[in-house]
Structures are given as structure tokens and as C-alpha cells.
Image: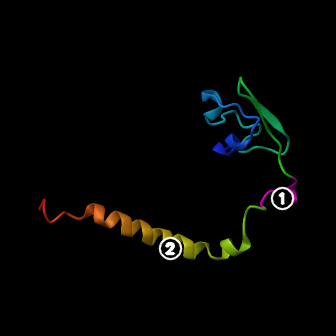
Amino acid sequence: MTRTIQQFAAIPRTVQAALPVMGRLPVPGGLGTAQFGIDRTDHFVLYVPLPAQYRNAWQSPVLAQRADEYREAGANLAANVLTPCGEKDSTTG
């Protein structure tokens, strides 16, 4: 789970609540299809899976079509950022 759970008013503003949610996966290799909860001492986090037709709704077909283009742009950006890190400064020799 991400820190986005901090956006909910019911989540207490405590050190414990700011920590990542950690717990055993309910089934080998995943979250499964049944809801389950994790007791955080000062609050309870409940995982409720979406119906199957909505589980991949976050994926955009348009973005999937352009994935290679985005990957290449990311590699170019990384190269442009990292290249100067490997160059010697003319003042230090």
C-alpha cells in the first residue's frame, strides 16, 4: 500500500500510521480475491478488492501503446543527468 492512505481523515496522525502497511499476503503470490485487514494498533487497514472488471482500470490503453516511447525518453533523461556526473571538472583536472 502507498502512503496515499494518509489522505484519509480517519487515519490518525501518528508515527505508527505513517509507517508502511506491512503484513503477510493472504494467498501465495498476491492479495487474492477476498477482503482482509491489517491491525495497525491505532487503526485498522482493510483491503477490499475491486470486481474483476475494474482491477486494471488504472492502466491506460493509450499509455500502453506509447510505453516504448516513454521508456526511451526516460533512458535519454537518465543519460543526460548521469553523463555530467562522470565528467571531470576542468578546474579539478
**The disc labelled 1 sits on which kind of residue?**
Tyr
Residue position marked by numbered label 2 in the rendering: 72
Is residue 54 within the magenta segment? yes
> Which residue is depicted at the point 13% across and 62% down?
91
In the image, farthest residue toward the top: 41
> Which residue is depicted at the point 75% across and 38% down?
9
Label 2's element? helix
Label 2: few (<14), some or many (≥20) within 10 Å?
few
In this rendering, would 90 be left or right of 33?
A: left
The vertical placement of 39 against 69, above or below, is: above
Give the label on residue 39, or none: none
**The disc labelled 2 sits on which kind of residue?**
Glu
Is residue 52 within the magenta segment? yes
Mark closest to the chain's N terminus, 1 or 2: 1
> Which residue is depicted at the point 86% across and 60% down?
53
How far across and down, in percent of the image, does residue 73 sit?
50, 73
How far across and down, in percent of the image, does residue 26 sit?
77, 37
The boundaries of the magenta stretch are: 51-56
Label 1: few (<14), some or many (≥20) within 10 Å?
few
What is the spatial separation of the Cα atoms under label 1 and label 2, in whole angstroms?
Answer: 29 Å
How far across and down, in percent of the image, does residue 77 sit?
44, 69
Label 1's element? helix
The vertical placement of 48 against 79, above or below, is: above
Residue position marked by numbered label 1 in the rendering: 54
Q: Pointer 1 and pointer 2: residues touching (CB < 8 Å)?
A: no
